[in-house]
Amino acid sequence: MNVAQDSPPLKRVDRGRLLVVEDSAEDAEAVERALSRSHPLLRLEFVTHGRGLVDRLLEAADVPGIILLDLNMAGLSGHAVLGQIRARTELDGVAVVVFTSSTAPAEVESCYDAGADSYIYKPLNFELFQTVLKGAVDYWQQNRRQPSAAEEPGTSGVSGASEVSRAAGAAEAGPAGPSVR
């Protein structure tokens, strides 16, 4: 049995769109300000919760290239949303960037285990906030997310100085910027 033939087709990914899943109006406004300065042509969409998000993505003709996902939301948590996204092979081309206030190594590892592509700590300083977001968006606009089954042997699909090595047991994210796998 060929799993690739049995899987639904991947959704068309629009690299010029970014979806922000954030329940804090203050954080959403900061994301909008930061990205409108660094990426003025990027089309931003905002939702305040994850309920129904996967269904909405599956019904759409195309999906955003990046989802910026807060973890600590009322109702359906960011962890649950991440799990729902990664459970759907049609959404494998979408990069999910967790953007949260937690720096706990167990939280970072849990997100990567669930399929997050990057984990970024939300800095309190706006200039650093803007720099970190710019770096993550630049990275994922330049590096297409590769579904794990499609990765070629010997490649990790990860590059950059902020790479996190699962083999070494490292799981770090801090104010210096994103960790990427």
Image (tube, grey):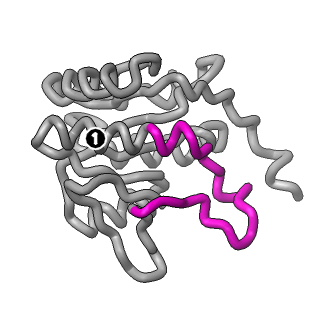
Residue 131 appears in the picture as rendered: yes
The span shown in magenta is 138-161
Compared with 36, 154 (above or below) is below
Q: Nearer the viewer, residue 24 or 77?
A: 24
Quarter containing the N terminus = bottom right
- Please tell me whether mark 1 sits on a helix, a strand or a loop: helix
Q: Is residue 63 left or right of residue 96?
A: right
Determine which quarter of the picture holds residue 179: bottom left
Q: Nearer the viewer, residue 50 or 158?
A: 158
Q: Is 123 a magenta residue?
A: no
Spot occupied by residue 66 in the image (x, y as percentages of width and height): 48, 35
User: Residue drawn 18% across and 48% down?
Assistant: 101
Q: Is residue 13 left or right of residue 77?
A: right
Determine which quarter of the picture holds residue 30: top left
Q: Looking at the magenta stretch, what is its main secondary structure?
A: loop
User: Residue drawn 50% across and 23% down?
Assistant: 17
Q: Is residue 82 left or right of residue 65?
A: left
For label 1, the residue is 131
Residue 77 appears in the picture as rendered: no
Q: Is residue 57 left or right of residue 12?
A: left
Spot occupied by residue 46 in the image (x, y as percentages of width and height): 34, 20
Spot occupied by residue 35 in the image (x, y as percentages of width and height): 33, 26
Q: Is 152 a magenta residue?
A: yes
